Image: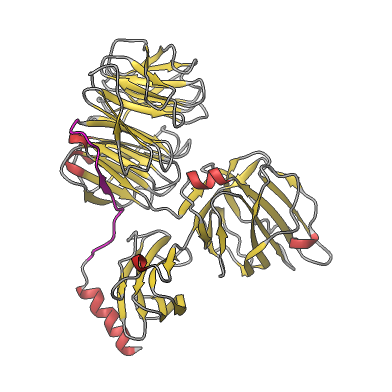
Amino acid sequence: MKNFFYIFILISFFSVNAYSQINWTQQVSGTYENLNGVFIVNSNVGYAVGNNGAVLKTTNGGTTWIAKSFPTSSNNLSVYFQNENTGFVGNQNANIYKTIDGGNNWEVNGSANVYAITSVQLTSALTGYCGDHYANIQKSTDNGQTWWTLTTTPGYDAKIFFLNDGRGWSVDTYGYIYRTSNEGLNWSGVRISTDTLSSVHFYTSTIGYAAGDSGRVFKTTNGGVNWTLLNTGTISKLNSIYAQSLNSVYACGNAGTFLYSTDGGTSWTVTSQGTQNLKNMNFIPNTIIGNMVGNLGVIYRTSIQGFGCVGNGTTSVSYPFFTYWMDSRTDMLFLANELSSYGVIPGPITGLGFYFTTADTLTMNGFNIKIQHTALNTLTGFTSTGWTTAYSGAYKVPGTGMRYIYLQPPYFIWNGTSNLLIEICFNNSVYTNSSNVYSTSALNMTFHNHTDLPSGDGCTGITTGALQATRPNICFSQIISSAGNNNKLVPDKYYLSQNYPNPFNPVTKIKYGLPKNSFVSLKIYDILGREIRTLVNSEMNAGEYIVDFNGSDLTSGTYFYRIETGSFNETKKLVLLK
């Protein structure tokens, strides 16, 4: 162990800060037109628009992009799709074009003014909004057939963003941010910058970001009443910003600038994706599946499948961790299309993450997590049979924020087509306060009860309960491993890759490869060389493996991961940044 500790010290002094970044892959667009907007419908279907009437479509995740015919050669500036077939394109000629057949045919939907449409968004089947070059904000209530002006901000080039609850925001070239909480009926504005603001995006009704010239990013935590300037570490003009979660936010801009934060904007990592100006980015909500587009037809794609979060609401609820009483049981239903659209893939489920708003100190005994495939589309009561136990033992919530419960092997395998039913239950001999988590409105998808049983346990003794109005937000973590006799998946030598992402909070992925069957030990150590986690300690078949490491219960700092086989050992550094 002493020699191992010296290895840690040497790595600390001499290793390069080669932190893994969010990886973007350039795709072949088939055009050299400047691309101004992109919209990703799902993991397969997406659209990009640009100058000279350019409209591109992919149906295979960007492996190929096909040019679609368009009725004008004027520049297309913005794009939004309600589903795979119905979408809208804002054009420089002041028209909004609509398709209902996936871009094969387009019809002109006029706007309220004669100025270029710089942004467009639909919030329901009928209601939509757009912004134009003279900073008019317009609205439609007939699925884009007619539009009228709601308000006008002082600058130019209004860029809008709306949530489905009627809250909306707009930024312009004069550094103003306007906001509404009643579907555009009333607006209030504030000037937060003397520079141009080019993009605004909110993750919740309170947490949002705005970006613009000189690398400026502003953040609000009260819905846009007050804004704080963040230190991004770049002076490049930023053209697009996207809040992917409560802590993760991305931005792109001129000269290939891409930057991201994993701690709500406190710190940023700035990278370069080529040299072209990057104009717009879009993601599938609550996933890291998305695209960036820019000048000369550049399109980039990023995707970390096998990790997805279902639900983005901020209603705090005590189930499934209701420890104010001794016994609790909660069933939660997730539809297959929900899981797929948020990035969960067929395969093992190795962890469930919850965002805790409060964390009680009580250890929950008899704590069980059970999972099963189901044909149910709604819940009417508890399900008693068909379960696979994914976790059994004791559990204590380590603290507030995003926390993962790592499940026990052999892992439950989701088949990719069936709905998932998840049950969390426990049996305590004492009670304290409850731990609360964020949840999202979802009728008939959660069934819960809590009580003090005189005997038995919550998993079997609680048989009746009630439907809840919201369902806890859950992030699904997965180990994606490939092994066996498929030669394409067997490397020609041992290797240990740098973890991704790095720095990370709280989950990162570690990939390693085995050219032959080997006994593998993969462990995590702290800066003093003390072992803190065993990730792998078993005989493994030849192949390539990806293992999740969750540091939700650890403090920020530098850690090390080390792989040992019979003939190969390697140590690398990773940084947990909360």
Left or right of residue 254: residue 222: right
Q: Quadrant where the N terminus lies? A: bottom left
Q: Would you place residue 456 above or below residue 325 in this image?
A: below
The reply, left or right, for residue 125 in relation to residue 117 is: right
Is residue 192 or residue 126 the one in the foreground? 126
> Looking at this rendering, what residue extends furthest in the bottom direction?
2
Q: Which coloring applies here? A: secondary structure
Type of secondary structure dominating the magenta stretch:
loop
Total numbered labels placed on residues in the image: 0
- Magenta-span inclusion, residue 558: no
**Residue at 40% across / 27% down in the picture?**
102
Note whether 315 is above or below 395 in the view shown: above
Relative to 314, is 114 above or below?
above
Residue 320 percent location from the top left of the image: 65, 54
Residue 573 in percent (x, y) is at 30, 71
What stretch of residues is rendered in magenta?
A: 17-33
Q: Quadrant of the C terminus?
A: bottom left
Residue 20 in magenta stretch: yes
Using the image as rendered, state which of residue 190 and residue 497 is in the foreground.
497
- Residue drawn where x is 30% and y is 78% of the image: 570
State the residue at coordinates (76%, 57%).
384
Is residue 433 something one can see in this rendering? Answer: no
In this view of the protein, can residue 523 be seen by the observer? yes
List the single residue furthest toward the right. 454
| Residue 497: image location, x then y, percent | 31, 68
Residue 151 pos. (x, y %): 38, 15
Relative to the observer, which residue lies in front, 344 or 101? 101
Is residue 137 or residue 416 the one in the foreground? 416
Is 309 placed left or right of 227 in the picture?
right
